[in-house]
Structures are given as structure tokens and as C-alpha cells.
Image: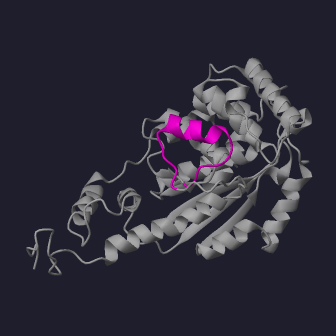
Amino acid sequence: MSRFRSMDALSHACHNLPQPDNGARAAIRAREAILTKPQGSLGTLEDLVAWFGSWRPLSLDTAALCVFAGNHGVLAQGVSSWPGSVTASMVGNFDRGGAAINQLARCADAALHVIPVNGLKATNDITRAPALSEAQFLEAVSLGYDAVPETCDLLALGEMGIGNTTVAAALSAALFGGEGRDWAGLGAGLDESGIRRKISAIDRALALHGRDHDPLTLARLYGGWELAALLGAALAARHRRIPVLLDGFVVTAAVAPLALCAEDGLAHVRIAHYSNEQGHRSLSAKLGLSPLLDLALRLGEGSGAALAIPLVRAAIACHTGMASFDDVAIADGTNRISAR
């Protein structure tokens, strides 16, 4: 049975969220100011440790990477150069340890969890009907919520689903405005005619479903199985005070409704990297989040999120392991001893 039995119950969970510990953040900032380095010299690492520490103690013992997989009926519109059967093939590859994400998760010392949603049965074609019914949407959100490990200090989120950049673009347009051409990208390697079909599919979906709905309903109308599960996982992490690293465009679009349900709905997340997908930079800007890496990745699978895990480890290590000026004697620029 679904954890969330109604859209109202899910909405309540999305609007009533634990808040960051601003006292812990202030204490971290105060310690940063006395560490043996020029103030601010570790840049984003200092921001990362303050962010992480506002949600949980500064110890990253267990990192988890959850990759949700699903299929999409909109593939019937010719929006991908790959068939939907590739989703199942890649899930099998993940299970055998043969994908890029297996190697990256191992390098990041992160436990990899691959979760196919609804047996990889496709959603409805969003150009003809809502992607999911209310019951299906709540089932997928609940699955994602319950998939987050209980013992987890940092959660990274990824996805696998042929055609899911189309529904991510459609959802982004529905949430933040614009048309298909503003959000549609190359996906897994579309040619010009494929891009035109993708734009057309997005615009037809927007004309059919409209935008005058609450954010969760928009997620149901335009998204899909794995996008709904990603939303549930991000919500579970917030309720459990677990910081989250988001992968690329699809994952960011999937959790974006939380930002519109509550003003600080994504305060517990950081975008790991800029995807090469066209809409990701625009979506990141709309959410007020700056990705940590820019490596021209467009693989998906959680690859960028896995690569950012060591950055968080490094940030915590520097903050907790460095000496302070109270511990050592260091001369400042005037050759005066600034501390004992």
C-alpha cells in the first residue's frame, strides 16, 4: 500500500518540512574563520561544509546513490534515437556492474541502489493523456520515499529512462514557463529532425494539459515513474535530514516541484553538475542553485552526482581536520605573529 494515500497527504508532506539548523551553520562559519588559511580561500568547499552541517553532524560515514529507472509512452512520438528496451538492458548492466555508474559509485565509496519502477512498464504518452493517474503517481512517490536507506549521511540521486529528457523538458516548461524549443535538448543524441519531433511533442503536451495546476499535479501530468520516485526520495531525505546531491536535468526537473511547494523546499539539495542538456542551466537558474561541477556530461545514471560525493568528503575533511590559528603560530603579511 502506498505511503501517501492521497494527493492532499502528499501535499501536506511537501509543505511541512524540517528546517536547516542555522545555529550549526553559524558555528561552522565561525570555525572556518579561524582555520589556518585565508578566509574564504577554500571557496565552494566552505559553502558545502556549512550546507552539510546544517542538516547533520560533520561525519560522512555512509553515502548512498539511488538510481531510479522507468519508461515513457511519449517514445511513440519519435523523441529518442533509442528504443525503450534499452532501459531494461541498462538496468541489467547496472546489476552486473558493467556501467559507468558502477565504477563511479565504487570510486566515491557509495552504496549503489538501482530501482526499476513499475516493472519498467511505460507511462501514458503525454501528448495524449496524463503520464500517470493519481494512484500511480502516489505509488511511485511512495516507492522512492521508502527506497532511501535508513542509515545514510549523504544521498545522491540518478535516473535511467529512454525518453525522459522529453518529459523533464515538458515538466520544466509547465512549472516555469516557455515552450518546447526553450527546454528541449539533444537527449541521447538526437538529430535535427528528432529535435523537431521532441519540441512538437512537448508543445502538444502543454496544449493538452496546460499549466494551471499545482506543482504536484503538474509532476503527475508530465513526468513519469522514475521522476515521481525521485521526488519521493528527495522528500524522504528532507524529512530525515539527509543532504542530497542531484544529478543532471532529469533529476533536477523531477524534484523541482518541491521548490514550488515550499519556499525553501530544496534547501537540503545541491546540484552536482551541469548537464549538457539544454534546459539544465535554465532550470538551475530558476531554482537559484549553482551546480558544483561542469564536465560536459550527458550520460545520466547519477554519474555527475557520484563525482560530487568526494567533494563533500573533502569539504568535511578540511573543516574537521585543519588546525586553527589558536593551535599554531603563523605570521601574517606584516610578519607579525597573528596567533600563538
Q: Which residues are magenta?
A: 272-292
- Say which residue appears at 52% left-offset and 55% top-offset: 237
Whether 227 is drawn above or below 241: the answer is: above
| Residue 66 horizontal/vertical position (percent) | 65, 61
- Say which residue appears at 89% left-offset and 48% top-offset: 82
- Specify whether residue 153 is in view: no
- Specify whether residue 113 is in view: yes
Q: How many marks?
A: 0
Q: Was residue 207 drawn as part of the magenta stretch in this picture?
A: no
- Quadrant hosting residue 155: bottom right
- Say which residue appears at 80% left-offset and 50% top-offset: 118
Q: Was residue 282 drawn as part of the magenta stretch in this picture?
A: yes
- Tell me: 299 left or right of 311: right
- Tell me: 76 left or right of 183: right
| Residue 305 horizontal/vertical position (percent) | 59, 59
- Quadrant hosting residue 174: top right
Whether 61 is drawn above or below 246: the answer is: below
- Say which residue appears at 44% left-offset and 47% top-offset: 267
The quarter of the picture where the C terminus appears is bottom left
Judging depth in this view, the residue of 274 and 219 nearest the camera is 274
| Residue 308 horizontal/vertical position (percent) | 54, 63
